Amino acid sequence: MAEPTTQVADMTAGEMTSLFKSGELSPVEAAEACFERIKQHNDKVNAYNIFNEELTFAAARQSEERWRLGTPLGPIDGVPVAVKDIFITKGWPNRKGSTLTSPEPLQVDAPAIAALRRNGFVPLGRTTTPEFGWKGVTDNPLDGVTSNPWDPTKVSGGSSGGSGAAIPLGMGPLALGTDAGGSIRIPAGFCGVVGHKPTHGVCPMWPPSSFYPLAHVGPMTWTVADAALLMDVLAEPDARDCTLPPASVSFRESLNHIHLAGKRIALSPNLGYVDVDSEVNAAVCAAAGAFEEAGAIVEACDPGFSDPLEAFNVLFYGGAANALRDIGPEDRAKMDPNLIKVAQWGSERSLLDYMGAANVRAEITEQMSLFHRKWDLLLTPTLPIPAFDAGLEVPTDWPYERWPTWTPFTYPFNMTGQPAISVPCGFTQSGLPIGLQIVGPRHADVAVLQAAHFYQQVRPLTSIRPKLLSM
């Protein structure tokens, strides 16, 4: 771990826009600072796979002029943003980690990008993802392996692994992720950043995800305050998706009104069935103490459902089969062979298998709704293990073949559609981040963000950056 720094690239989005307003910093200077970090460190971690500095600095200069005139477009005007290479973005290709995709730039924006553009963002580049975003680690046939910024021999997580690796190194204060089984929260936990999976339907998605209804769009940031800021943008409605009504309050403003005294918070270090690393368990249980100190009623209580892995596999790998439905044998031979395997498995499930998995999804959704009649929030680890060796789908000597077997805390809440956030809560003895997951009932994104912000204020780790910065 490195000493605290105060360089421009380490500033939050909120700090940057305050300085844009005062004239002490320009969006061009902010983009230059992030690019300097990218040039220093991207070769070590492979967070980004595509750049277009002409587009980046054109957007930065336009923002600089708006701030000079006092007419910013929105709360992130001029802020550099890392975009996962799975979002359709005007002027940029959408490679999705696959050699089968076109390198030609597209001419339309996905809803998340359209919202960012309306609010004056500065696109830094495209961040790496496994092919078609299919797994909880990030490597693909097109771009290679993405590594952990705290230890490049370890995984960054996935599928938003490039976004997770970029933020701790100051290669952008804001990043976009998608999450159908933990793909925001897994890299957030492994890389020591904040990752929020909103309530399903809060942030519009288009085109429809092959992994519907598991898939979500969400922010990945250094601070919870920045995650809430980005949520104010990403939750803007879009006619191309049947989303929930717009939030009645600003997520960012809600952080000024936190009241935890008397809140009932369940602590479940293992959900009743997960084998958890001892360092992870200790860090999460210690984190729960911060909420008790604030007057919350914290008690050990498991949600009560059994592991829904079998049903998740049918839903998720059915989505993988859906993503590959029009790809023939010759092209499949060029793809990640394990993606081909799980897609084949998914394609062999029957309609009744799929509907049975949907029934399980409905059952645990109901069970969690009843659970939250008593409990305002649920605390768990984000992941049961620290980051393992890069380039692998599962740890060495792991008894199972596929990635969901080591992500048991994330995928259940994709099935239920609840809001869930990962916030850093410590480090292992070897210096790898540990994440605390905070889960709320559906539509309680404000409560989840408030709890995470409270925790980050009383147990801050934001001054600690990866040791790569000192190299």
Image (tube, rainbow, N blue to C red):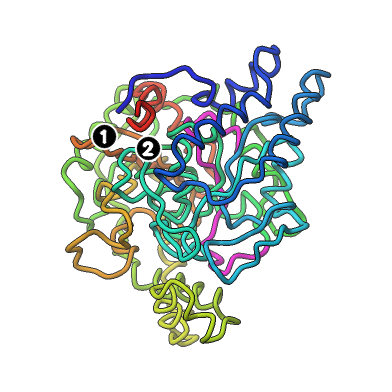
Task: Answer with left or right where residue 140 lies relative to residue 299.
Answer: right
User: Which portion, as a residue range, is magenta?
Assistant: 207-230
Q: Nearer the viewer, residue 299 or 53?
A: 53
Instruction: Tell me the SS state at disc 1.
Output: strand
> In which quadrant will I find the C terminus?
top left
Q: Looking at the picture, does residue 279 appear above or below residue 343?
A: above
The numbered mark at residue 192 is: 2
Task: Find residue 338 and report its horizontal and vertical position in percent.
Answer: 38, 73
Label 1 is placed on what type of residue?
A: Phe
Label 2 is placed on what type of residue?
A: Gly
Task: Find residue 81 and report its horizontal and vertical position in percent.
Answer: 60, 38
The numbered mark at residue 369 is: none
Q: Nearer the viewer, residue 319 or 6?
A: 6
Which residue is label 1 attached to? Answer: 427
Indicate yes or no whether the magenta region holds residue 223.
yes
Task: Answer with left or right where residue 296 lies relative to residue 179.
Answer: left
- Decide: marks 2, 1 in contact (CB < 8 A)? yes
Quarter-of-image position of residue 102: bottom right
Q: Nearer the viewer, residue 201 or 61?
A: 61
Task: Find residue 59 and report its horizontal and vertical position in percent.
Answer: 74, 36
Instruction: Tell me the residue at 50%/63% (across/down).
Output: 142
Crowding at dot 2, Cα within 10 Å, few <14 / some 14-19 / many 20+, comes out as: many
> In which quadrant will I find the N terminus?
top left
